Structures are given as structure tokens and as C-alpha cells.
Image (spheres, rainbow, N blue to C red):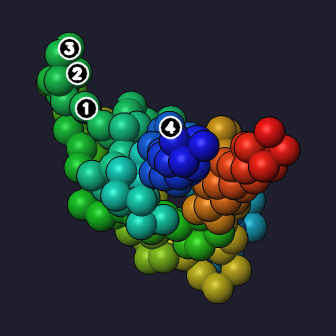
Amino acid sequence: MFGRFISAAVLAGCAATAQAVPSEFKFSYTGFFDKEANRFDPAAVIAGSFIADDLNRDGLFSANELTSFKYSDSNDYIGCGVGDQYFWHCTIERFGYRIGGPLKFYTTWSASDVGYQINSSTITGEEYVYNYRSPNGAQSHSLLWTGQTTLAVSAVNPVPEPSSLALVALGAAGVGAASLGVARRRKRAA
């Protein structure tokens, strides 16, 4: 009977420390000040997705926990510039997301070929910049975050919250304690 209690405690400990699977999120920022048009554009959108695993279980997804990051129809920032994509270079300088909190990232990317050069950078809360140059001319586009810019983030596969894991552990401990009580009653009855 003491063995059952130990088994329940071990089960509870395992449940509490179980590693979450990588979580996928979709995000969109909507409403920016369009620098070239010199006006607020409520329909301007920067959208994308990312997959991350909270490896250190601190409730914050950081850059080193990303397994995929895409936005604005870009290639995946994780692993870009490898294989046949040698002309594509990108970086994620900073990244952070806490469920229910703000999404922050700073990214840069560039692509070039014989006939063109493209580069872009995004600092959330500040500015998105896109530049294109070719022998036929150049084009630039900038969007600025404002107090009216809104963020929407949705989990594609929701992450269990720490409180949920704690409830699983408590439930497992409760089952173990109940089993221990039943075993004691049986022993007394015998």
C-alpha cells in the first residue's frame, strides 16, 4: 500500500514536469500609419505564424525556443539561407511572446539576384520597412505602429497552462491517496 502511494507521487511528479509539445500560433497586427501615403490605414496588416516550445517552462517563448517563424508571405526565418535558398538571408534579433501578452520581435531579411535587391526589417511597436531596387527603379514602403494598431494571436494547438498541469498532478496524487485509503480499510476489515 505504501508502494501505491509512492507510485501516485511519482505519477504526479511526472505529470507536473511533463514536457509540452511545440505550440503553433497565428498572429496579426492590424492598423498602421502608412508613411508614404501620410495617413493611418486601418486595413494594413502584418500577419504570420510561429512554432515554439517553452523549453525552460518560464511561460515565455523566446528566440532560442522557436522552431518556425513566418510572416508577410516570407520564407521561414528558421533555417533561411540554406540549401537552394543561398540568395535569401534573414535574422531574428529579438523575439518574445507570453500567452495573453504582447508579441515582440525584431527581424531583418534580404534577397538579391543579378537584377534586384530587396531588404526589409520589422521592429514590433515601431516600424516595418520594405525596400526594393532594380535597374528599373526603386520602391520603399514603411508602416508605423500607432496606439490604434491591434494585435490578435490565436493558438493553433493550445498550450496547457502551468495551472492545468498542477491540477493533473493534484488529481493523480488524489487518486493515489484514495487507493491508499481503500487498501487500509481492506486491511482493517481482514
Question: Mark 3 packing: few (<14 Cα in 10 Å), some, or many (20+)?
Answer: few
Among numbered discs 4 and 3, the one appearing first in the sequence: 4
Res. 110 image quadrant: top left
Residue designated by label 2: 85
Q: Point out the image quarter for the N terminus.
A: top right
- Label 1 close to label 2 by CB (< 8 Å): yes
Residue designated by label 4: 21
- Label 2 close to label 3 by CB (< 8 Å): yes
Q: Could you tell me if residue 132 is visible in this image?
A: no
Where residue 52 sits: x, y (%)? 44, 45
* Label 2 SS: loop
107 up-or-down from 7: above or below: below
Residue designated by label 1: 80
Marks 4/2: CA–CA distance: 29 Å
Residue at 69% from the left image edge and 54% from the top image edge: 177
Res. 46 image quadrant: bottom right
Among numbered discs 4 and 1, the one appearing first in the sequence: 4
Which of discs 4 and 1 lies nearer the camera? The answer is: 4
- Give the residue type that dot 1 points to: Cys
Among numbered discs 1 and 2, the one appearing first in the sequence: 1
Question: Mark 4 packing: few (<14 Cα in 10 Å), some, or many (20+)?
Answer: some
Residue designated by label 3: 84
- Give the residue type that dot 4 points to: Val
- Give the residue type that dot 3 points to: Asp
Which of discs 1 and 2 lies nearer the camera? The answer is: 1
- Label 1 close to label 3 by CB (< 8 Å): no
Marks 2/3: CA–CA distance: 4 Å
